[in-house]
Image: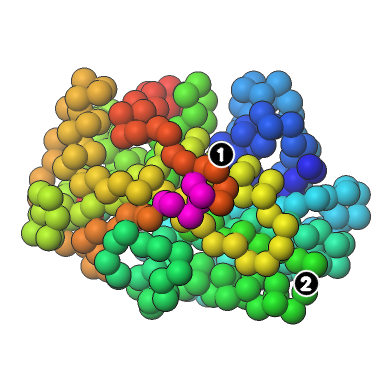
Amino acid sequence: MKILVTGGLGFIGSHTIIELIKNNHEVIIADNLINSKIEVLDKLCQITGIKPAFYQIDVTDEEKLTEIFENNKIDGVIHFAGLKSVGESVSKPLEYYYNNLVSTMVLSKVCIKYGVQKFVFSSSATVYGDQPSPLREDMELKKTTNPYGETKAMSERILTDTVNANKDFAVSLLRYFNPVGAHESGLLGEDPNGIPNNLMPFVSKVAKGQLKKLSIFGDDYETVDGTGVRDYIHVVDLAKGHVKAIEKLDSGVNIYNLGTGRGTSVLELINAFMKVNAVDVPYEIVGRRPGDIATCYADADKAEKELNWKAELGIEEMVRDAWKFEQQNV
Ligand code: NAD
Ligand code: UDP
């Protein structure tokens, strides 16, 4: 298939492009570089031997997007483009609602106009809100705690209504759990701007000595050791899930959790990082972070049954690859 990947130079998009190319798909990238670097394109070429067509456009720009569809016979889209920082979304709600919702609406509108049926969307486990894990796709969604989460919940609803009104349009809503790790080459990984908000990039920077110590947000949750439990998934496994999802997609609204089905606590993750990489990660326990929940992990059975996809890499590979990328690049 010829697949348009929006946000394709970002963390998850770039890893997905490698897997798409490995599976003989042709890739076109649309990215405005708001949170990525153009060098990623060369790295993709280094890894795959293929340099995908690249359009530096904003996906909210209908005219520029339409040009891509005019000039290419596209079979499907994977829509990664979006702003993703929870904290920033609280201080800049309009930017988040505008970017994440308008890009989704414009892209689906252009897809329908050009008869492109397959639309895969990057959603998030955050749409479940605070509910007991394991989280299943058929659970009712609960209010999310920030504008970023709302953009994902609203995008899911917009796409669902659009499918209901257009029988030749089909979407796959992929709810990611906690993507971490990096490509095994060490060339691609997660390189957030400024001080990281997420656990794994923060741990990597502490291990490297660029940040003094990690603050663990609470050790009084009802979990195995009191620290928060999440379902960390290796970004390469996540990428492979997208290939399966777009290859299978043929009609309707299809919702899949992409997680491992296993929970890991903050302390377990740090201890694995220190042991596997033989480095020290100084930390201190501080108060809970507002908006955090105790536990969040997937019921991953649906994707296994219907997509024949299952995460294969474990915490050891995740911490190993995250550290390799950090040492080589950041
Ligand atoms: P990322 O920031 O690394 O990648 C997003 C890419 O989209 C960047 O290259 C950015 O430049 C581009 N972009 C943003 N807005 C754009 C626009 N309007 N037009 C064109 N390009 C635009 O993020 P990521 O971690 O790769 O996440 C990809 C998607 O997955 C996002 O939609 C994110 O919300 C979602 N997601 C991420 C996580 C996570 O933990 N990383 C979890 C759940 C969902
Ligand atoms: N966390 C932490 N210190 C940090 C960043 C995160 O203790 O500097 C904890 C956080 O409270 C949560 C887990 O690590 O229990 C994962 O947090 P992250 O922000 O990576 O993902 P999310 O909260 O979106 O699941």
Say which quarter of the image contains residue 312: top left
- On screen, residue 77 versus residue 328, left or right, reads right
Say few, some or many: other residues with alpha carbon within 10 Å of mark 2 (under 14 / 14 to 19 / 20 or more): few
Numbered circle sitting on residue 240: 1
**Percent of width and height locating residue 99:** 60, 66
**Dividing the image into 4 quarters, which one contains the C terminus?**
top left
Secondary structure of residue under mark 2: loop
- On screen, residue 120 versus residue 153, left or right, reads right
Amino acid on which the number 2 mark rests in the picture: Lys
**Percent of width and height locating residue 152:** 51, 67
Q: Is residue 62 visible?
A: no
Check disc 2 and report the residue beneath it: 167
Where 252 sits versus 29, above or below? below
Numbered circle sitting on residue 188: none
Say few, some or many: other residues with alpha carbon within 10 Å of mark 1 (under 14 / 14 to 19 / 20 or more): many
Amino acid on which the number 1 mark rests in the picture: Lys
**Percent of width and height locating residue 112:** 81, 67
Residue at 20% in and 28% down: 274
Please name the predominant secondary structure of the magenta segment in the image. Answer: helix
Query: Between residues 253 and 211, which one lies in front from this camera angle?
Result: 253
Query: Between residues 324 and 136, which one lies in front from this camera angle?
Result: 136
